[in-house]
Amino acid sequence: MNLYNGKLLWAEENQEPPFARSEILDHYDVIIVGGGISGALCAYSLAAEGLSVAVIDRGTVGGGSTSANMGLLQYSSDIMLHELIEQIGRDKAIRFYKLCQQALNQLHEIADTLDVSAEFTRRNSLYFASERSHVDRLKKEYDLLTAHGFKVDYWTQDDLLSYYPFSKPAALITYRDAEVNPVRLSRGILHKLNGRHVHIFEHVHVTGIEETVHHLKVHTSAGLFQCSQVIFATGYDTAPGLTGTRMNLTRSYAIATEPVDDLSCWKDRVLIWETRRPYLYLRTTPDGRIIAGGLDEDKPGTPHSDAFIHKRAENIKQEVHQLFPMLNLKIAFAWAAVFGQSVDSLPFIGRHPSKERIYYLLGYGGNGTVYSMVGAHILRDLIMGRPNPDADIVKLARGIDSTE
Ligand SMILES: Cc1cc2nc3c(=O)[nH]c(=O)nc-3n(C[C@H](O)[C@H](O)[C@H](O)COP(=O)(O)OP(=O)(O)OC[C@H]3O[C@@H](n4cnc5c(N)ncnc54)[C@H](O)[C@@H]3O)c2cc1C
């Protein structure tokens, strides 16, 4: 599947040499199919257990949807906490939000261990009510988050106007979210691990899995690999053995501007998003660019025409301009990408319903990176044979049917 078209910011920035390829071992404890952020975080948590791991990607590490990612890391999901409570119950919903909050801390710790800077920076988030009719939902969310120990402020229209140059009916400020360069994070993790317990194989296509009594045979374009367990971290691409009956692939657009001289109008360089669906979301970069995305369309695939992508990019720029009219915005990068969202807004993480040795980490949703971190720990526990009470919240069987 063509995951994106256009000119991507992170891909342009990360023109690094390929990973040195290791000799293929006779046997790996775990083979991870997919070297995006999900595969990298799984490799990290499994290597920490002393397991031997091969990460196999048919392209380059971080070259899938991870390079289309805008790099906002937030514990709040596309589905508000009070809506998630209605969907899965109070205990599970609160636990899921707490897991996402912990995942932000874990991502921070990992980013700090790397030899390269993944540009991980703590930011607060500003979540504004797009319309007056959304204010009650924000108030309800504020009450609930506060009651469960999340640090959050509720701002009226006047509060907001005293800090930012745009007027919206109300907003929530949530604390200690973060921004990151997702490609540097993925590649930095795997560079750190490569050659130790972990072997990286770029430009190798996994074509099939065969189960034998003692191990799994993984057929690839570079020959046969053998292992005890397989994790599919294949992103929005087809995950073999499953059909997604409760997820939708849509298309989304994003821009990165040329660096802006003066961002003093953007207090604390908060991550900004809104209650409208699909939402506009935006952030700044360390070199002063603005990245903004949105305008999701319920259409499969990505448009091939640069002219079409630029038309959408101009629309996003206009939306940013309405928020910050004093900024002189010039589009430097514009891309369209496939975006995957489960119907219940939760990721699919866990063991195949009937195949003991096959696992999936499919972090569908706007919080994909945070979900990948949550999933890396859940899968580590399942593979190590440890109980993980949170696995039930995101298990596959709730929404994906097995086909084999
Ligand atoms: C426009 C856009 C903006 C986004 N913004 C954010 C954001 O701000 N914050 C956030 O948290 N998330 C965001 N996301 C979501 C985020 O990008 C995804 O959750 C994340 O990239 C998924 O990572 P992954 O490793 O699971 O998948 P990928 O990065 O797609 O990696 C999967 C890898 O599997 C490989 N692969 C697939 N099949 C095979 C095979 N058979 N053999 C070998 N290799 C294979 C592919 O080559 C690919 O490299 C955004 C997504 C889009 C599209």
Image (tube, rainbow, N blue to C red):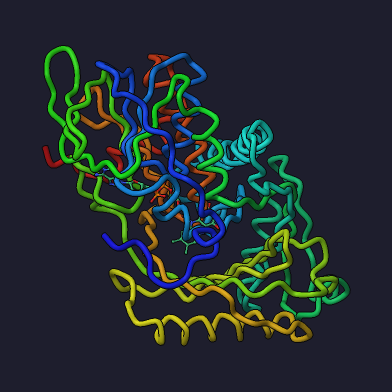
Which residue is at 71% across, 53% downward?
143
Q: In the figure, 203 relative to 275: above or below?
A: above
Residue 104's quadrant in the figure?
Answer: top right
Is 402 located above or below residue 59 in the figure?
above
Q: Relative to 70, is 167 on the left or the right? A: right
Answer with the quarter of the image where residue 250 lies: bottom left
Looking at the picture, how far across and down is residue 206, in whole percent?
Answer: 22, 39
* Side of 137 where 79 appears, left or right: left
In the rendered image, residue 64, in percent from the top left (x then y), is placed at 39, 53
Measuring from the top left, give residue 175's x and y in whole percent: 75, 50
Determine whether 255 is above or below 187 in the image.
below
Count of numbered badges drawn on the protein: 0
Residue appearing at x 35%, y 41% in the figure: 202
Q: Nearer the viewer, residue 373 or 330?
A: 330
Closest to the observer, 133 or 331 = 331
Q: Position of residue 266 (x, y in %)?
A: 79, 70
Instruction: In the displayed orientation, state which residue is furthest to the right.
Output: 162
Residue 376 lies left or right of residue 114; in this view the side is left
Q: Quadrant of the C terminus?
A: top left
Quadrant into which the N terminus falls? bottom left
Residue at coordinates 41% horizontally, 87% vertically from top-left?
A: 307
